[in-house]
Image: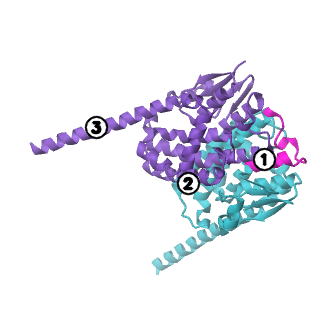
Chain colours: A purple, B cyan
Amino acid sequence: MRLKVFADRMSQPSRAVIIFCKLNGIDFEEVKTDISKRQHLTPEFREINPMKQVPAIVDGRFKLFESHAIMIYLASVFPGVADHWYPADIFKRAKIHSVLDWHHSNLRRGAVTYVLNSTLAPELGLPLNPNAAAEAEKLLSASLAKIESVWLKGNGRFLLGSSQPSIADLSLVCEIMQLEVVAEKDHDRILGPHTRVLKWIDDTKNATAPHFNEVHSVLFKVKEKLRRKLSDEAENKLESSKKTSLHSKI
Amino acid sequence: MRLKVFADRMSQPSRAVIIFCKLNGIDFEEVKTDISKRQHLTPEFREINPMKQVPAIVDGRFKLFESHAIMIYLASVFPGVADHWYPADIFKRAKIHSVLDWHHSNLRRGAVTYVLNSTLAPELGLPLNPNAAAEAEKLLSASLAKIESVWLKGNGRFLLGSSQPSIADLSLVCEIMQLEVVAEKDHDRILGPHTRVLKWIDDTKNATAPHFNEVHSVLFKVKEKLRRKLSDEAENKLESSKKTSLHSKI
């Protein structure tokens, strides 16, 4: 029985798991679980993951959720996965666990909260919250600075000074990629100062091509849609201010 | 060279690591790193953990932080650690990773944010924030309900239906223990409805005695201090209302 991966490509941990499978030649079936259509809340999906979150996998009789746990499991049971993704060496492995644990309450929390409250909330029927976005930006920026000063120091192109990527690079870069959907000036303000992070994102993209861009294509489409919406709104505003000014002249 | 554990027993992940070492006969030196004295912010500690958080370990030339990563590392390098703490079986191990990953953004986030904003903030020179506490209580209560319905279902006394505790039991129970310091009515309102969780806490305490209570004793002292403070405040209020009423009679 083929491995089933329940995922929504708009979810960054879903993308990490899908890219991981594709890169490592793991034969799997992607079961689209559309969050915007609330497919993660159905009774059927609750049987897969009672926490109602993607990604989740079913491998024969075995069910698992949480993307880090999934990638570690896949690296352990599929013999074709190259060692650098999740090294057998206890010390290297421990450092990867440390990055992944840190990620939850720092980069991930900052990025998710920022993107939701600055940009995506209306797409999910929620109001934007500029105060929450500003708070989250602080955590996000501090996290990016820490990645740069702690895990990208040294000569390696990847986290922890490695010459090849691990599941930590994949998880963290997929997380940062969601910033693609925010307004360009916000994206550049947040990521611009972190040149090492930007280079690492490029290195990770290149090391995982062509799957990385293919799996992110849905995100790029949403980005285009949101930017078109922003520019339409700006145009409408200009148009209506022209009318008002014409009116006031008449 | 002995393992060094940099810890503050008021920090729940610090307690989990110390109890883990004691239970498993790991020879270690506990290096007290007092958060209330800002010892985690010194340049010396930054050399141990650039993220400025406890717990952190130094094992020979190897440094590591993040409590889950530390316990997994210790279970892997110290041969005396019984298998049930971090099973060699890939499937059991994967489920433990899943619990630990889930923990970060659910139980831990809910509990830390609730306790800080409802109780501990003034001890750290910060204001209480009842709105943030109320928000956090929702996440905390939802997390306790999930533990009960997902991971404590079945016949085992511990998480995932196990008959013996794992590092996930230790981590999550130490987290919940911080609720000891909140006002009794709040503690009972939050934990009271979750009878399975209460039984599991007791089972974990018993399975890890006498170290569990010994390492938590500092928390029990803070609890006493805070409750005394609360009752003094109530008494002062009563006293001053008596005086006011006497005054108004005169």
Assign the magenta stretch its main secondary structure. helix
Q: Residues within 10 Å of mark 3 (few under 14, many from 20)?
A: few
Q: Position of residue B4 (x, y in %)?
A: 80, 60
Q: Disc 1 marks which amino acid?
A: Phe
Most extreme residue toward the left is: A250
- Mark 2 to mark 1: distance in Å? 26 Å
Q: Mark 2–mark 1 contact, CB under 8 Å?
A: no
Q: Earlier in the sequence, mark 3 or mark 1?
A: 1
Residue A6 quadrant? top right
Q: Which residues are magenta?
A: B68-90
> For numbered disc 2, what is the local secondary structure?
helix
User: Is B236 one of the magenta-colored residues?
Assistant: no
**Residue that appears at 61% across and 54% down:** A149
> For numbered disc 1, what is the local secondary structure?
helix
Looking at the image, which is closer to me, B23 or B110?
B23
Q: Mark 2–mark 3 contact, CB under 8 Å?
A: no
Residue beneath disc 3 = A235
Q: Position of residue A206 (x, y in %)?
A: 59, 35
Residue beneath disc 1 = A91
**Residue that appears at 88% across and 58% down:** B27
Q: Earlier in the sequence, mark 2 or mark 3?
A: 2
Quadrant of the frame with the C terminus of chain A:
top left
- Mark 2 to mark 3: distance in Å? 35 Å
Quadrant of the frame with the N terminus of chain A:
top right
Q: Residues within 10 Å of mark 2 (few under 14, many from 20)?
A: some
Residue B34 quadrant? bottom right
Residue A40 visible within the image: yes
User: Is B69 one of the magenta-colored residues?
Assistant: yes
Q: Nearer the viewer, mark 2 or mark 1?
A: 1
**Residue that appears at 46% across and 35% down:** A124
Q: Position of residue A118 (x, y in %)?
A: 44, 44
